[in-house]
Image (cartoon, helix red, strand yellow):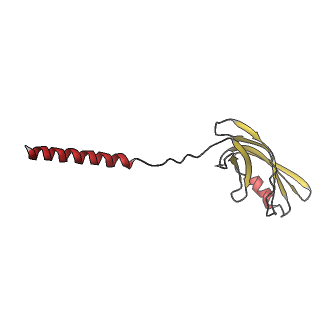
Amino acid sequence: MKQILSILFLFVFCISMSAQEKEEEHHGTFKIQKTGQLFKVVFDDVNYRLIGIDQYGNVLDTAVVAFKMGVTIKGIYKEESTVGYKLSREMQQLLGTCDQTSKIFFDKIKAKERSGTIVEMPKFTYSIGSVNKDYDN
């Protein structure tokens, strides 16, 4: 009888230990990324697109839904508009004809916030040749 009780005790002890091990496997930490309202829009000159930045510094890749771009080339102001966040082929061709002192003007920027509402963002300029990028937000 003592053997059966000791075996039963050992069996219950082993089951409780394995249950505690499985329970501890699911413990961990959660990293919560704060998300906020759209703060500003900047020009990504590497990928030729406009990206949104929220108030916490998170990048919103596809926030911009439409915009106009203007540039003065040899005294003549040219303007193109597009739907989406990437520069159209015509806009990229305009940039190809610019010199290092040109400024690009982005205007009528419409962007979608995380909540889904469309907002109009302030216009800004981008200097092609300067080391310090000129954002007038």
Q: Residue furthest front?
A: 2
- The foreground one among 20 and 119 is 20
Tell me if 129 is positioned left or right of 21 in this view. right
- The foreground one among 105 and 11 is 11
- The foreground one among 30 and 116 is 30
Residue at 81%, 63% in the rendered image: 130
Residue 82 position, x and y percent, is: 74, 46
Residue 123 position, x and y percent, is: 81, 46
Residue at 23%, 48% in the rendered image: 14
Tell me if 42 is positioned left or right of 62 in this view. right
Residue 54 position, x and y percent, is: 68, 45
Residue at 58%, 46% in the rendered image: 33
Tell me if 125 is positioned left or right of 53 in this view. right
Q: Residue furthest left?
A: 1
Residue 27 position, x and y percent, is: 42, 47
Q: Residue furthest right?
A: 75
Residue at 80%, 53% in the rendered image: 135
Quadrant housing the N terminus? top left
Q: Number of numbered discs present?
A: 0
